Image (cartoon, rainbow, N blue to C red):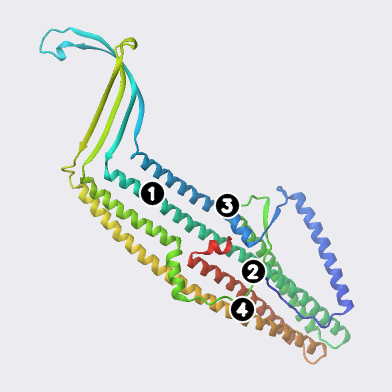
Amino acid sequence: MFRFNTHFTDRRTNASVLAHISAAILCVNLFASLCTDGLAQSTPFPPAQSIRLSLKDAVQLALKQNPRVMASRLLSLESDRERQISRSALLPQANLTATGLLGQYNKASIQRTSERTTAGPYQMIQAGPAYSQSLLDLPLFRSYQIAREGVRESLAVENVTREDVVATVVAQYLLVLRAFAIHDAAKARVALAERLYEQAESLQRTGIGLKIDTTRAEVELQNERQNLIDAETLTHTTNYILAELLDLPPDREPVVVDELEFFDVAEVETTTAIDAALVSRPEMQAQAAKERITRLERKAASEQRAPQIDFSGDWLYQGSRFNNGIPAYTYQIDLNVPLFTGGRIHAEIARADLERQRIEQDRRLLEARIVREVKSAIDELKAAHKNVEVANLGLQLATDEVAQAERRFAAGVTTNVEVVTAQDALARANSNQIEALYRFNQSRVNLAQAMGVVQNTYAK
């Protein structure tokens, strides 16, 4: 559960101010209701139905129907079908064959004679099963092993996609939470600015305040209202991106139910985290599968020099007609030993060696990237944790500053320049706290992704 709390202190609320605020809220609600009815009549689409989603619900929904996840799953299934196709070449093959033949020949084509006479017509029919089996074909067996490793690689790549999609969804969910936190803080500052404007106006009527104080308070009020409009727009646009990631239909709209949260995190030892990441990251698993495939490809290329033995045969009911046929059969063993291939085998072995070297360089780059990501994520998480504590203290001080400036202005000690300055400081403190909370939660996501456990962390 994520929690974000923003507090404003109001120590000078009176009945008249509450009455004005209540009337204003009633007018705004009435106007919003009329506008909503008008838009509902003019829009060509039905109103969107909301679906309440916690962070865990959003992640599970994305893993179920996100297009990227579905596409990676289909690629894994295709790879498994390739494995089955490669395996079938190692298994016995059988088929049913039938032949009907009617022929006539020129005897001069088969005998040394100038006489052109015909032989035939001859008629033959045969039908029955035919079968074959590879007895020794090492490259064929290596092809099956390569396809089997390809399945492992495709599954690892699928996990890479799932990790990336989960991290993206969680990050966008946090952006939505941040947008709503900004909106709530802006709404509270608008209420504060309205109260301070009414206070300045009241003091002006009694002769204590000046008109410039009222104008200054009104300018600040309009600024806060503009910030509220921008904040409300941000809540919509970030929610649209979340709906896209979840692949929701146009008539469904996600509604986040969690809030930004801050809590103490356990100390992460850098060396231990790096070692764990090098094992658990799906990119490393895919890299290992590529290396095994490269070794098998080299073996397959070199083993093409080995003899290949195949067995085939058939059993046929054979005759000139159906009523005079007898069983006939054929058994055949073929031995093939390559002697000269024009340098093809040598070139294939050299190509496999070059591919192995390239894969080794890719592993070095991947390991360096993982080490950098883990170290950066740990440092960012530590800094974000400290920033939240500083931001909370800053918000508390800014709130006290507004209260003190308000009391000084009400007592006529100073103008409302101090009040406006305190309001600006409060706005910055609000933004700093929201941003610090967001970065803290996003840093946790970055560390989980760097460790290769973001799916286990947020989907279970």
Q: CA distance from mark 3 to mark 4?
A: 34 Å
Which residue type carries mark 4? Val
Residue under pointer 2 = 178
Q: Residues within 10 Å of mark 4 (few under 14, many from 20)?
A: many
Mark 1 residue type: Arg
Residue closer to the observer: 315 or 360: 315
- SS of the residue under disc 4: helix
The circle drawn on residue 388 is 4
At 87% from the left and 80% from the top, the residue drawn is 14
Image position of 87 (left or right of 331): right
Residue at label 3?
Answer: 64
Q: Mark 1 or mark 2, which is nearer to you?
A: 1
304 over 187 or under it: above or below: above
Count residues near mark 2 (Cα–Cα under 10 Å), then give few for <14, some for 14-19, many for 20+: many
Q: CA distance from mark 1 to mark 4?
A: 49 Å
Residues 273 and 343: in front is 273
